Structure formats: C-alpha cells, structure tokens
Image (cartoon, grey):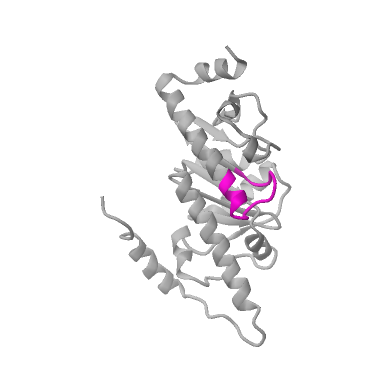
C-alpha cells in the first residue's frame, strides 16, 4: 500500500473515497481548462474543491497536464495535509479562507490578463455590464499583498464581502461557487467584463456608459429566476 493510499484511507471511508476521486478528476479538468482558455500560464493560478471537511487543491508547481488520479492532494480546514504527498498550492491560505467563511464548494484563482490589468487601474471594476449582478454587485479590488500570505487572504475576504468574486491587485482573480463549473464560469465572466471595460474605455474622446445601482438591483432580481426549472 502506497503512502498516498494510506493517507486517503485514514481520511475517508470507501464512499467518500469515491466522491473524492470524482471531485479530484473534475478539479484537474477545471485546472487544465484555465490553461486552455488562456486564464493562466504554466502553473500559475490554482483550483480547490471541498468534499465534506476535506479541501482538494492543485499542488504547487506541477503542470496540470501531468496530474493523474494518483496525485490527489487534500487538506483539512486547518490546512493540515490529509491526502497525498505533493505540496499543496502556495495560495492555500486564500482557498481555506474562502472555504471556512462561505458556503463555497469550489474556488478558482487565475492570473487572467484583462482582469489583472484592471486590478492595477481602479479600486473596483466599473459596472459596465449587467452580469456584474451575477457576482453579487460591484467587483472590488483587494489591495496588494504578497502571494501565499495571510495578509492577502484577509484583503481578499474583505473584497469578497457580499460577493462571489473579486480582483486581486497586480495579481489576478478569485471566484467561488457551489460547483467547479459555477466557480469557473464566474471567473470567465469576470475576465470578459474586464476586457469589455478596457476595450470601451480605450476609445479616445468617449466614456463608456455605466449601469446604476437600481439597474443592477433589477437584474439581480431577474437572475433569481434564470435558467431551467427543476
């Protein structure tokens, strides 16, 4: 029995092991998607998914296309490693802060170009599009702090207050959701809105129109009934 396998059996029963394996496969697929869609370069960015009290995370410095089912990496909510032998992402403090303080089941962090550019220009993404409401309102920029620090995690939590996504100054984005797909879609939407604002605001002599709080509130209500009924 490998050391990884022994750690896994100590952390979870057979049913949870199956759930963890499925979640790990989805996490790796999501991480690879961030590279394929140009939201990260190399091993930058990271992804996490919560299964019970275990948080699966991408490992530090390992190209996503090399990850296999045997590389499962997980910690408990205190950060103690309970699955695998690969070192967890250096941004673990941010991921754990989100999982401990929200109902998140998944977190996606990227270094998306347009979003990172916006983070260097303004303290909040101007409400250029109604999908701002899908992230809970105006997308704030968390003040800069060195990566992997508790200070960055604290700044991020303040920027996330009442939101499901924020920008990290001179760094990137972070979003969360009830599923990996939702967290990823919010990241992609945030990057698109940043690109839209940069494009519109770059036209000489013109200023983009922005939405009011009342208009965003109306959209927020409409979004509550959006999608297929179950």
Q: Is residue 158 above or below residue 10?
A: below
Could you say which quadrant of the image residue 37 lies in?
A: bottom right
x then y, percent, for residue 131: 46, 65
Instruction: Report the residue that reaches farthest toward the top.
Output: 1
- Residue located farthest toward the bottom when viewing the structure as drawn: 205
User: Hey, which residue is sitting farthest left in the picture?
Assistant: 230
Residue at figure coordinates x 59%, y 72% from the top left? 197
Q: Is residue 100 visible in this depiction of the protein?
A: no
Q: Residue at x 56, y 15 (%)?
A: 6
Residue at the right extreme?
146
- Is residue 201 something that shows in the picture? yes
* Residue 185 versus residue 106 in the image, above or below: below
Q: For residue 28, which quarter of the picture?
A: top right
Identity of the residue drawn at 60% across and 26% down: 80
Magenta-colored stretch includes residue 200: no
Which quadrant would the N terminus be assigned to in this image? top right
- State the image coordinates of residue 144 (x, y, percent, origin top left): 70, 54
Q: Position of residue 194 (x, y in %)?
A: 59, 66
Q: Main secondary structure of the magenta part?
A: loop
Q: Left or right: where does residue 131 sit relative to residue 156?
A: left
Residue at 57% over, 80% down: 208
Does 24 appear above or below 133?
Answer: above
Which stretch is magenta? 32-46
Count of numbered circles on the image: 0
Q: Where is residue 78 drawn, in percent x and y? A: 58, 30
Which residue is at the front of the view, 220 or 186? 186
């Amino acid at each position: 029995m490998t050391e990884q396998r022994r750690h896994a059996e100590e952390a979870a029963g057979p049913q949870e092991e199956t759930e963890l394996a499925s979640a790990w496969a989805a996490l790796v697929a999501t991480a690879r998607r961030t590279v394929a869609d140009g939201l990260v370069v190399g091993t930058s960015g990271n992804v996490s998914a919560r299964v019970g009290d275990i948080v699966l995370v991408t490992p530090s410095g390992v190209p996503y296309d090399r990850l296999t089912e045997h590389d499962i990496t997980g910690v408990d909510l205190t950060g103690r490693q309970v699955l695998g032998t690969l070192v967890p992402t250096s941004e673990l403090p941010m991921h754990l802060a989100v999982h401990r303080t929200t109902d998140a089941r998944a977190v996606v962090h990227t270094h998306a170009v347009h979003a990172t550019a916006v983070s260097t220009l303004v303290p909040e993404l101007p409400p250029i599009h109604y999908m701002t409401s899908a992230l809970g309102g105006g997308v704030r920029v968390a003040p800069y702090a060195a990566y992997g620090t508790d200070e960055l995690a604290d700044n991020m939590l303040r920027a996330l207050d009442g939101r499901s996504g924020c920008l990290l100054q001179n760094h990137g984005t972070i979003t969360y959701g009830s599923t990996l797909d939702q967290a990823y879609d919010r990241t992609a939407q945030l990057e698109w809105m940043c690109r839209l604002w940069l494009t519109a605001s770059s036209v000489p002599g013109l200023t983009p129109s922005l939405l009011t709080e009342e208009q965003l509130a109306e959209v927020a209500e409409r979004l509550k009934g959006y999608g297929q009924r179950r």
